[in-house]
Amino acid sequence: MTAFTHFNEQGRAHMVDISEKKETQRTAVARSSIFVNKAIYEGITNQTMKKGDVLAVAQVAGIMAAKKTSDWIPMCHPLQLKGVNISFEWQITHDTYELKIEAFVKTKGSTGVEMEALTAASATALTIYDMCKALDKSMVIGQTYLLEKKGGKSGDYHRP
C-alpha cells in the first residue's frame, strides 16, 4: 500500500520487525541549541542559578531521555545503549547568547540510534529552559537536527 515502513498492508501503524537485521555498532550525533539572555548566560556560566548547576542537570536529563526514547516515540524499539554523551559550547555574537548542544549515542544492535540522539538533544534543551524560565520565558530553542549517523544497512550519513 505504501513505501513507509511503519504502516502495515492495511495502512495501519505497526512496529517494524528488526529480528532479521544484522547486529552492528551504530552511532548518532544530534544537535540542538537554546538562545538565552545575558543574565541567564552569566547565571549558567558562573553557576549562580537558584535551581543549581544547569548544565549538569541538563546532561543527566539528556542521558535519561536517550534511554527512554522508546517510551516517548511510539514506533521506536527499546534499545540497550552502550554510551551517551552530552556536550555544550557557547556561541556569543553581539548581544546573542546561544548554547549549542550536541548529543552522541552509541549501541550495538539491529536498529539505529538517531531518535535517541535527537531525543537527548531535545530534552537537554528543554531542561535548560525549565531551569532558567524564572529569569526569562522568552528563551528560544533552536533547530534540532541529526548531524551524523554510522552503521546499519542504510550506511553512514553526514550532514553536509
Image (cartoon, grey):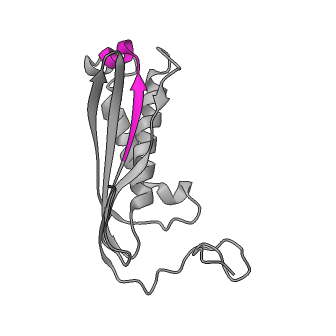
38 lies above or below 6:
above
Say whether residue 30 is visible.
Answer: yes
Is residue 33 a member of the stretch shown in magenta? Answer: yes
103 lies above or below 113:
above
| Image quadrant in which you'd find residue 8 | bottom right
154 lies above or below 42:
below
Instruction: Residue at 26% x, 34% y: name it.
Output: 89
Is residue 21 a member of the stretch shown in magenta? Answer: no
State which region is magenta.
Answer: 31-43
User: Please, which residue is most extreme toward the right here?
Assistant: 10
Residue situated in front as seen by the camera: 26 or 48:
26
Residue 4: give x, y in percent of width and height.
59, 73
Residue 100: give x, y in percent of width and height.
33, 36
Instruction: Residue at 32% x, 21% y: name it.
Output: 44
Residue 17: give x, y in percent of width and height.
52, 81
24 lies above or below 67:
below
